[in-house]
Amino acid sequence: MRLTDTHCHFDFDAFADNRAGHWQRARAAGVHRLVIPGVEEAQWPRLPVLCKTLPGVHYALGLHPWWVAGASAQWQPRLVAALDAADTRCVAIGEAGLDMACSVPMAEQEAAFVFQLKQACERGLPVMMHSHKSHDVLLKWLRRHTPVGGVVHGFAGSLQQAQGFWKLGIHLGVGGTITYERAKKTRNTIAAMPLEALVLETDAPDMPLCGFQGQPNHPERLPLVLQALADIRDEPPEVLAAGLESNAGRLFRLTASAPAEK
């Protein structure tokens, strides 16, 4: 089985000791594609350079709500310039979004999110979204500015909210949360949604899986997320993998990469 990690912070320092070696480990586990979300200005020039060195690795450009307060007064034109100069490995805008637990005023978060939504709509790009206790507000803005697609990463909302996102063509990112039996609401929601609405992710080095608490997460553990999904949906992992790969490919317009190393 070949899998795509649709949300992995592979540029973070947790992988800096041997990034090529970490990617080789992930590919050996069957993860042949990966998308790195952009979170801050300083990252935007570095991501295209990094992704050129790693086969199957793609990126997005955006401003995460946690970094809004520290952004420069010129971040909007700088993001536009970075998107204008981006190569074909840039497959989305984000990680944009909203976070009700963040110290950044909600008005500032919403302004940054809407700006990025409008860029996505103008450029025909999907949006990678962070949402913490803000699904309903996110849905409000998505109804006003509906991109060609997107994903709410690490989804942990209600079935009604999940259906609201999918009605707009927004996928749900399925990650380590479903490996915890106590996450019953999320597990039940993900089990009830159509497979076409789902994509896999690790959020590595964050969002550790059950059994790996206290350790940096790694994209090589994506098959464990797949197995957890197969268990809660009572479906063969091979069938799920094929559908999830198709979803990721359509969402981010990804082409097939070279076979994973054995």
Image (cartoon, grey):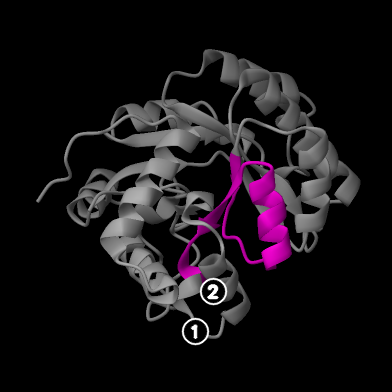
- The residue drawn where x is 49% and y is 62% is 206
Q: Is residue 91 above or below residue 184?
A: above
Q: Are marks 2 and 1 in contact (CB under 8 Å)?
A: yes
Distance of label 2 from label 1 (alpha carbons): 8 Å
Q: Which residue is mark 1?
A: 181
Q: Earlier in the sequence, mark 2 or mark 1?
A: 1
Q: Position of residue 6 (x, y in %)?
A: 45, 47
Q: Position of residue 83 (x, y in %)?
A: 58, 20
Considering every residue shown, the one lying at the far left of the view is: 262
Viewer-proximal residue among 255 and 217: 255
- The residue drawn where x is 44% and y is 43% is 247
Query: Can you tell which of label 2 and label 1 is closer to the viewer?
Result: 2
Q: Amino acid at mark 1?
A: Glu
Q: Is residue 247 above or below residue 123?
A: below
Q: Amino acid at mark 2?
A: Arg
Q: Quadrant of residue 201?
A: bottom left
Q: Is residue 217 above or below residue 196?
A: below
Q: Position of residue 153 (x, y in %)?
A: 57, 53
157 is within the stretch colored magenta = yes
| Magenta stretch, residue numbers | 150-177
Residue 66 in view in this figure: no
- The residue drawn where x is 69% and y is 25% is 121
Query: Is residue 255 left or right of 103 when viewed as pictured?
Result: left
Query: Is residue 2 left or right of 80 when viewed as pictured?
Result: left
Element class at badge 1:
loop
Q: Which residue is mark 2?
A: 187
- The residue drawn where x is 80% and y is 40% is 143
* Total numbered labels: 2
Q: Position of residue 242 (x, y in %)?
A: 31, 50
Assess disc 2: are there few (<14), some (14-19) or many (≥20) residues with their C-alpha within 10 Å of its C-alpha: many
Viewer-proximal residue among 27 and 259: 259
